[in-house]
Image: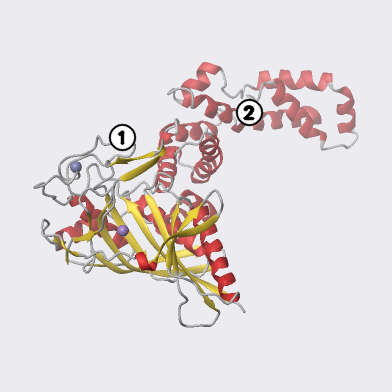
Amino acid sequence: MNYEIVVGLEVHCQLNTESKAFCGCSAKFGKSANTNVCPVCLALPGALPVLNARVVEDAVKLGLATGCTIARHSILARKNYFYPDLPKGYQISQYEEPICSEGMLHVETDEGSKDVRLVRIHIEEDAGKSIHDIGDDTYIDVNRCGVPLLEIVSYPDMRTSKEASAYLQKLRQIVKYLGISDGNMEEGSLRCDANVSVRPVGATEYGTRTEIKNMNSFRNVERAIEYEAKRHIEVIEGGGVIVQETRLWDADKLETRSMRGKEHAHDYRYFPDPDLVPVLVDDGMMHRMREELPEFPEDRAARFVSEFGIPAYDAGVLTVERELADYFEATLNVSGDAKASSNWVMGEVMRTLKEKYLDIHEFAISPERLGGLIKLINAGAISNTIAKQVFELMQEDEATPEAIVEREGLAQVSDTGAIEASIKEILDANQKQLEQYRSGKAQLFGFFVGQCMQKMKGKANPKVVNDILKSMLEG
Ligand code: ZN
Ligand code: MN
């Protein structure tokens, strides 16, 4: 029997607001334990939460970007459960009236493209963190309590693990383009739970699903879904029954294991939080958020092709990340040469970022300086080979490319006298090759050019070398 996989994803995205969702504490990641806290996020009696306006704006932006219906009126609810890292004994979330609903995410994979429908996007707060790896005790860090999250819930529309990972990557790209989250999976800014089931191909009913938690990379999402689907098929083929349960992905053992069964399913006793007023989105906010939407990757790539005439492939690579696309455009603004700018960004810049594990905003060479370097090449002041040397040197200090060329004596030599002299020396020193050339071995021309460039340490203007060599060989 042939089976198909059915996957729906629940993604928690941590917003990059300065302060938390319901108090003025810093929302920054990585501070020493229990330092970003106040009576509100510690749940001291009498402390009252106030919703951070940025959280609402971010939710509206993501909703607009994914074609959701934005609720002009929504409510914050209490999701009650006991856990040591949750001082209030409830999480502020949204239940019956989420801020965004019924959206769509367009996903591309090698097998084709597909629209994955969204059930909802709602606002909620994060819980604290239990720390189990210090001795035998468990410690609690409540810094993360109250950090704002958006939870994005999809319909079970995905049919392969690749589609699920493409969906997640698309979502990450959008929140990064919107500038509302850093989308960092390793640091937990993007956390994904997958609902997985299998069914015979052609069936209309869904099979029993299990929920997988704890996948902190795209690769692990794919692996976990594949593992789980295979496990379902084996159980069914062996005459067994899938139990609806929550399972944990173990990235070391590459397997899922049972975490809690349905019999322990929570009744969260949701009810509207009486401490918080309804969330209202008025026409003014809708208008402002629409205005603030960035140009999205597909549109930007299409514009790069039509406006700058670069290949669609280049445009696709350059727009994967908003910051890289910004960097390319800023480089082009200075250099005035789209294809050269694209080649440098996709080549030397991306290679360096990869080698040094850097993000583009950490890169030492500003787009202004890279644009300047390209201008030097196009003006014939330096060759491409020398430009690569200058590029390396530019990473070591703040000097302009012109200053580095000057300081290091790298300017291209177009002085015909100097080039003539060096060609003459080379022809004298390579009599045998010269004879071979004259008796018809035309490809030796390149050999002489190479020798001359080497002798002049790559600084000779290749066009001038070619011209002079030609006339000298013919003479
Ligand atoms: Zn606080
Ligand atoms: Mn949630």
Name which residue lies at 37% across and 68% down. Answer: 263
Q: Is residue 364 rendered to the left or right of residue 39? A: right
Q: Quadrant of the C terminus?
A: top right
Q: Amino acid at mark 1?
A: Lys
Disc 2, SS: loop
- Residue 66: x and y in percent read 34, 64
Q: Is residue 468 rendered to the left or right of residue 272? A: right
Tell me whether the residue at label 1 lies in contact with that at label 2, contact meaning CB atoms closer than 8 angstroms: no
Disc 1, SS: loop
Residue 109 can be seen in this image: no
Residue 38 occupies which quadrant of the picture? top left
Q: Amino acid at mark 2?
A: Asn
Name which residue lies at 34% across and 44% down. Answer: 130
Q: Mark 2 or mark 1, which is nearer the start of the sequence?
A: 1
| Front in this rendered view, residue 225 or 470 | 225
Q: Residues within 10 Å of mark 1 (few under 14, many from 20)?
A: few
Q: In this figure, which residue is indicated by the disc labeled 2?
A: 461
- Residue 27: x and y in percent read 26, 42
Q: In this figure, which residue is indicated by the disc labeled 1?
A: 31
Mark 1 to mark 2 CA distance (whole Å): 55 Å
